[in-house]
Amino acid sequence: MALLLPPVGSEIFRRFQPDSLEKIQRRHEAKEEEQQRRKEKNIEVAEEDLPKPASDLEAGKPLPFIYGDPPPEFLNTPLEELDPFYQSEQTFIVLGKGNTIFRFNAEPACYLLSPCSRLRIAAIRILIHSLFSLFIMVTILANCAFMTLSNPPAWSKIVE
């Protein structure tokens, strides 16, 4: 029987390791086999009976209080999925500042970088940092300001 409440405490947070990919692959294969059996037996599943993502574990939302505070060493590092819906999908989460949930694809980035590679982890840390979002917004606003100039100076083309 499925648990009604998720487990609490820091033991639920597990680092995303290469063996995590193998677990995900096994869950995905089992899910596909189940779907294949349903097709063979012509069993229709109603849409409301299909599993859905947990609304409190959406990307961009803070981690629910029921999970407690993750240990500091787990912040800004890839972790295994907490949402049962995504556990058979190839995704992992990263908890950022304020325990905000970020969800990423676990397939190799650019066909080269695995989720556990140091370069990809560094890129994720930069991406989820609040200063990166601020830098992107300032860049967009500066570009908009230069585009609105009717008679731009010569150096503005170089800056753009």
Image (spheres, rainbow, N blue to C red):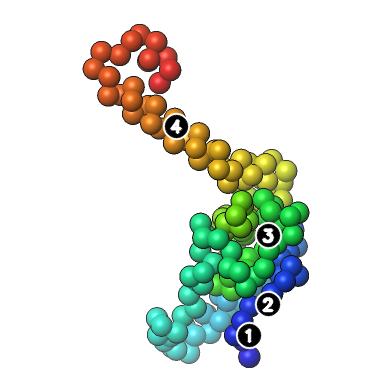
**Which residue is tagged 1?**
3
Q: Is residue 104 left or right of residue 148?
A: right
User: Which amino acid is tagged 1?
Assistant: Leu
For marks 3 and 1 on the same chain, the one whose residue lies earlier in the sequence: 1
Q: Which residue is mark 2?
A: 7
What's the residue type where badge 2 is placed? Pro
In terms of sequence position, does the residue under pointer 2 or pointer 4 come before the other? 2
Name the quadrant containing residue 158.
top left
Task: Check disc 3 and report the residue beneath it.
Answer: 79
Label 1 close to label 2 by CB (< 8 Å): yes
Q: Crowding at label 3, few (<14), some or many (≥20) Cα neighbours within 10 Å?
A: many
Q: Which residue is mark 4?
A: 138
Q: Is residue 25 visible?
A: no
Q: Nearer the viewer, mark 1 or mark 4?
A: 4
Q: Position of residue 12 (x, y in %)?
A: 71, 70
Q: Residue placed at 49% from the left, 85% from the top?
A: 38
How many neighbours does mark 2 have within 10 angstroms: few (below 14), some (14-19), or many (20 or more)? few
Tell which of 124 and 9 is nearer to you: 9
Q: N-terminal of the two: label 1 or label 4?
A: 1
